Amino acid sequence: MVLGAIFLTGANFFLVWIPVLIRQTMDRVEQLSENNYQVPDRILETLFTTEAAEVLGWNSLILIGTVFMYGVLLFATRQTLIVTSRKVEFDIRNDIVNKLMKLPQSFYSRYSSGEVYVRATEDVNKVREYYGPVIMYSINTITRAGFVLTMMFLVNTELTLWALLPLPLISFFAYWITGFIHRHSTIIQEQYSVLAGRAKETFSSIRLIKAFNRLEYEQNRFEKESESYRVKKLRLDMIESLFHPGLNFLIGISLIIVIWKGGEMVIAGTLTIGNIAEFLIYVAYLIWPVAALGYTTNRFQRSLASWERISEILNLDAQIENKEEPITKEVEGAIEFRNVSFKYPETEELVLKNLNLKIHPGENVAIVGRTGAGKTSLVQLIPRLFDPVKGNIRLDGIPLKDWSLEKIRESIGFVPQETFLFSDTIGENIAFGVQGASQKMIEDSAEKAQVKDNILDFEKKFKTMLGERGITLSGGQKQRTAIARALIKDPKILIFDDSLSAVDTKTEDAILKHLRSELSGRTTIMISHRISTIKDADMIYYIEEGQIVESGTHENLLAGKGHYFDMYNKQMLEEELAEI
Ligand code: CTP
Ligand code: MG
């Protein structure tokens, strides 16, 4: 940046000599022409006298040299300052993404994805502008005004004061209009996000809209937003069209003052014609820096506001992080909850209350309970997607906080309740579980999850695209793909959160049979609403309102005639009814 400032100062140094050279040339030409006043075709005549040729030739050469130096230095300035700002932008953006990856889930429930996106793009761009244009224009304004004003005062103080008279007006005008443009652009930007968000929502739920016969309603709603966007945009366009004519008008006034007052002085004999030309160019030189003063003040304020928004993110505490020298040894798979209480950051109510649970390595555990009881919340604590508010969780007898996060997460195969698949090939979706998975690993885990036959039925097999630009899998196929993704990791701990809910009981049996041979030696936690899925588990826990209210094997629990027994009876009854 210092280098850029030096280049820019140099460029402006050369710039101020251009009017001086023009003045000298004009004055010389005038002198020469006065001597030849009798000749009708004055200019032609002067050009052919040797003295004139000398004056014009030399001055032109020097002028070209000066302009060339100015150009070279200006190029060097942009190359240093703008390139620097791009590098700053690159660093900030990487820092933000790095931070975003680590921020706790609570962050994502506080900020919408749109807001996060704007900070990582728009705001970073505005901060870049600070390092680029704002600094560049500021240095330019200072150095150029310094040189030009010095020259002007040296030539004629009175005319300088006259010429400067309208300049503050230009600065103020630029400040006012860029401020207005900025405020309106922000509003328009917001309106645009609303519009884009609405369109996105509409098209991703197009089936629902058609099924509910809401086409016209949606169309009207969109049209209304679109109209509001149009009106706002037109208002901005009008103000923007005012900018240049307004600026030119003020510039015109300055120039007229110089010619008027300068003219008077020439007539009075205190100034030459060349001086007027010189002054006109000086005033023109000052216009942009003076306008930039207003413009950069605005930009500077925006950059500052953006920087505040960015640093808010950068200064957030990641909360769930590795401590120094975390444990990275191999995981055996013993999990223990000790008096664990947990609540979500955005609510007050405890979702898990003083919960105790001990799972031995290789044990096959099931968790059942009504919807909203806290099953998903419980298993999310194991890979530390959240931390408990009270109590602690131990893995192999060591508190989770002492383990390396990467080690814990690497050792857990998690099949979440809501299946998410990327818009990528089905093979890549399965391979997501590990880095550098081979085709054989992908196929093996698809086989174990009972989804391989389905995949082979697709025309492009494992290369079948999913999601927006591809096919949509059925609910059960999705779930099994997610299971394959967890199995490919060959993890010590497997967590299935209601992961067989969308497959029929026959397929479920097949998966479970495969898993059982696969699962030996692995700790498994299986959440389910279906007793058939979990009745063979080593241990079943029944959760109600964040507490374990019953535990035991299937037979134990039935004999206890409690909640589990009721649940079992209800499901048996439903099955019988279904058979009728
Ligand atoms: N909850 C919440 N904030 C979240 C997720 C859940 O406040 N981000 C609340 C839910 O409203 C619910 C409680 O936490 O009251 C337990 O939710 P969960 O653990 O997801 O319940 P599950 O037992 O998993 O219910 P289901 O069987 O329906 O999956
Ligand atoms: Mg759940």
Image (cartoon, rainbow, N blue to C red):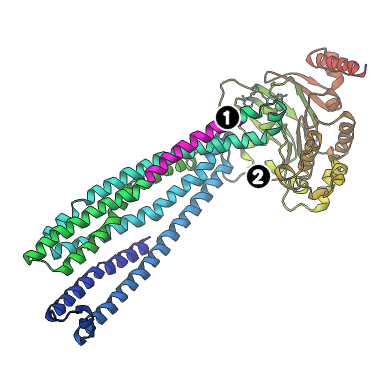
Q: Foreground residue, 258 or 329?
A: 258
- Which residue is the site of mark 1? 221
Indicate the secondary structure of the residue bearing disc 1.
Answer: helix
Left or right: 460, with 169 as reference point: right
Q: Where is residue 348 in the image (x, y as percent from the top left)?
A: 56, 21
Q: Which quadrant of the figure has residue 56? A: bottom left
The type of residue carrying mark 2 is: Glu
Q: Position of residue 355 (x, y in %)?
A: 67, 23
Mark carried by residue 141: none
Segment tinted magenta in the rendering = 219-240
Residue occupying the point 46% across, 36% down: 231
Decide: is 374 above or below 411.
above
Q: Foreground residue, 60 or 186?
A: 60
Mark carried by residue 406: 2
Left or right: 152, with 311 as reference point: left
Q: Does the magenta stretch include residue 301?
A: no
Q: In which quarter of the image is ligand 1?
A: top right
Magenta stretch, main secondary structure class: helix
Q: Foreground residue, 110 or 150?
A: 150
The type of residue carrying mark 1 is: Arg
Measure the alpha-carbon separation of dots 2 and 1.
46 Å
Left or right: 89, with 392 as reference point: left
Decide: is 57 above or below 448.
below
